[in-house]
Image (cartoon, rainbow, N blue to C red):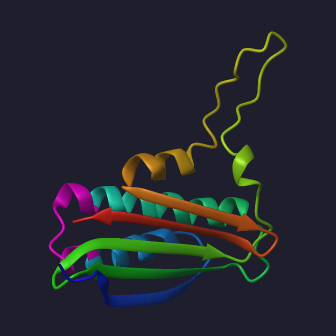
Amino acid sequence: MAKSAVLREVMITLRMAPEMEIEACEKASAVAESMSMSPDKIDEVKMAVIEACLNATEHSKAPRREIEMVFTVIGEREPEKLQITVRDSGVGFEVGKRGKSEQDATGKPLLSRRGWGLQIIEGLMDEVQIESGSWGTTVVMSKTR
């Protein structure tokens, strides 16, 4: 059995600006379509990319106001997996403390309409890795074809 390898890689840098997540979504869709991913999986990839871009824009406080993205097609001979890396150069966060909900005086979790981005990404993608620190945040997410 042959070892999986990088079959194709596309790198882009996007300015954090209104609707830049749409451009990222279009690129993700084009790469996923090129590897014959199903329409349902393409939709999941697009939603995950939108969430990752919005998170970086809203929370990173990146001085350069840019997001670097790498779309990597992995497989033996044919495309098997799409890996997407989203990187910002912001302030980072403590990954272990993410998703901890605030509580009211009785200890009951407060419901919030914010803070669901990473959980949504994890629900949509097959694999998600997050690294964050003072250098910024990198989200690597993968979807099998």
Q: Is residue 110 left or right of residue 71?
A: right
Instruction: Determine the image quadrant of residue 57.
Output: bottom right
Give the quadrant of residue 30.
bottom left
Left or right of residue 128, residue 46 in this image: left
- The residue that appears at 70% across and 23% down in the rendered structure is 110
Q: Which residue is found at the position 39% from the left and 73% from the top?
A: 83
Residue drawn at (71%, 59%), measured in percent from left and top? 59
**In the rendered image, the vertical position of residue 76 relative to residue 102, given as above or below:** below
Question: Is residue 61 magenta-colored?
Answer: no
Q: Residue furthest front?
A: 1
Q: Nearer the viewer, residue 1 or 126?
A: 1
Image-quadrant location for residue 107 = top right
Q: Who's the residue at 43% across and 73% down the image?
A: 84
**How many marks on residues?**
0
Q: Which quadrant, please, contains the N terminus? A: bottom left
Main SS category, magenta section: helix
**Residue 137: x and y, percent?**
67, 68
**Percent x, y for residue 130?**
60, 61
Query: Which span is picked out in magenta?
Result: 32-42
Q: Nearer the viewer, residue 95 or 70?
A: 95
Q: Is residue 114 left or right of residue 69?
A: right
Question: In the figure, is residue 50 to the left or right of 61?
Answer: left
Up-down: is 99 above or below 104? below
Residue 100 screen position, x and y as percent: 71, 36
Which of the pair 113/70 is nearer the observer? Answer: 70
For the C terminus, the quadrant is bottom left
Residue 14 location in percent, x, y?
Answer: 55, 83
